[in-house]
Amino acid sequence: MGRVQRLAAICAWLASVAPAAEPVWEALRAPDAVVLLRHSFAPGSFDPPSARLDDCSSQRNLDETGRAQARRIGEAFRENGIAVGDILSSPRCRCLDTARLAFGRAQAWEMLHGALNDTELRQRQLAEIKKVIATHRNRLPLVLVTHGSVISDLTGLNIRMGELVVLRRTANGSYAVAAQLYLN
């Protein structure tokens, strides 16, 4: 790829990212905002069958790229003056690590764990998550750090590791996707 082609590719990428980033910060300043954050980059696709919640070494974890990505997320929030309220996370280490690296804290919440192979459990978890979102009122943004399948179930979106979706309360009291942001 020549120099001009590289420059054109960078400009195209910047043009695709820049417009999307501005509404994110505006959406996060609105009352009742909720952030759905998929954990940062963790190589692979699933935990091994022997993975245990009480043993991070048995799970799929963030690599250095994922840890740096999580730190960039937190930096972007701070640079844009966005303070956050409660931070709930899947108990998987890659989610807890993402939350702690980005925001300095996290509270593990089993409902964000997901349940790919158990439809009944999955529906109960989604109902509990929706209840927490629905009762979030007039506070700093609520941050939920979880897995792609949970975010997809809540929004219908398939997002990348490290991508976030901002939900805002609509006039009728429900929540809708207001913005998305991916920091590579």
Image (cartoon, rainbow, N blue to C red):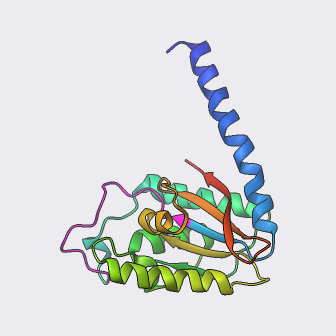
In the picture shown, does residue 77 fall above or below 117? above
Q: Nearer the viewer, residue 120 or 162?
A: 120
Look at 62% across and 33% down and name the residue there: 13
Please indicate whether residue 76 sits to the left or right of residue 38 in the image.
right
Q: Nearer the viewer, residue 26 or 108?
A: 26
Left or right of residue 121: residue 163: right
Residue 155 is drawn in which quadrant?
bottom right
Residue most toward the left?
Answer: 50
Above or below, 83 relative to 184: below
Asked whether, in this view, residue 170 is left or right of residue 51, the answer is right
Q: Position of residue 132 (x, y in %)?
A: 60, 85
Q: Considering depth in this image, is 126 or 57 the residue closer to the camera?
A: 126
Q: Please say whether residue 38 is one of the residues in the magenta stretch.
A: yes
Q: How many marks?
A: 0
Res. 176 in view: yes
Residue displayed at 34% across by 75% down? 115
Q: What's the magenta bit mostly, secondary-structure-wise?
A: loop
Residue in the image at 62% along x and 74% along y: 143
Residue 107 seen in the figure = no
Q: Find residue 126 and report its horizontal and vertical position in percent.
A: 48, 79
Residue 128, percent from left and from top: 51, 86
173 up-or-down from 184: above or below: below
- Which residues lie in the magenta part? 37-53
Who's the residue at 27% across and 73% down the image? 117
